[in-house]
Amino acid sequence: MRDYELVAIINPELGEEGLSGIIEKVTQSISGRGGEVEEIKNWGRRKLAYPVNKFMEADYVLARFKLDPKPVKELEAEMSASGDVLRYLVVKLGD
């Protein structure tokens, strides 16, 4: 398994319950693919540099996890299909 980081920008209209639901969904998605979530941090609401889907601020979430390379593509596909995730980036850590 490899180490990855995921940063997601979440729709600010969801509120606290919706945000925790998205975080739980990401955690279950990683665990369901045989990975292990090491840490999830809610960075809170931040101002965006430019409008994204007409929003000027959004909630940021950072997740560090271990997962095999092949299921990462499935995770990315699930993130892009979600209407509540405005933007996301998955980065492989180390070599």
Image (spheres, grey):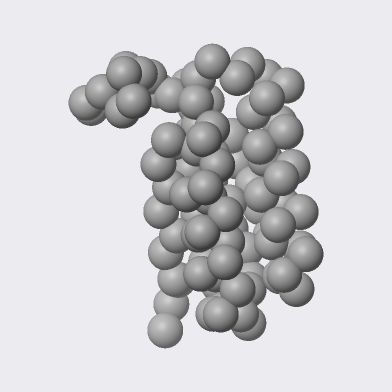
Apparent side of residue 95 relative to residue 39 in the rendered image (left or right)? left
Instruction: Give the residue at x 31% y 18%.
Output: 54
* Residue 69 to residue 36: above or below: below
Considering every residue shown, the one lying at the far left of the view is 50
Apparent side of residue 79 relative to residue 56 in the rendered image (left or right)? right
**Residue 70 visible in the picture:** yes
Instruction: Give the residue at x 70% y 57%.
Output: 29
Instruction: Give the residue at x 75% y 73%.
Output: 34
Q: Quadrant of the C terminus?
A: bottom left
Q: Quadrant of the N terminus?
A: bottom right
Q: Position of residue 24 (x, y in %)?
A: 74, 42
Q: Nearer the viewer, residue 48 or 53?
A: 53
Q: Position of residue 69 (x, y in %)?
A: 54, 80
**Residue 5 visible in the picture:** no
Where on the picture, by quarter, is residue 92? bottom left
Q: Position of residue 23 (x, y in %)?
A: 67, 40
Where on the picture, by quarter, is residue 3? bottom right
Q: Position of residue 2 (x, y in %)?
A: 56, 79
In the rendered picture of this protein, how many numbered marks are placed on residues?
0
Instruction: Give the residue at x 77% y 64%.
Output: 32
Q: Nearer the viewer, residue 27 or 44?
A: 27
Q: Nearer the viewer, residue 43 or 74?
A: 74
* Residue 6 to residue 55: above or below: below
* Residue 48 to residue 3: above or below: above
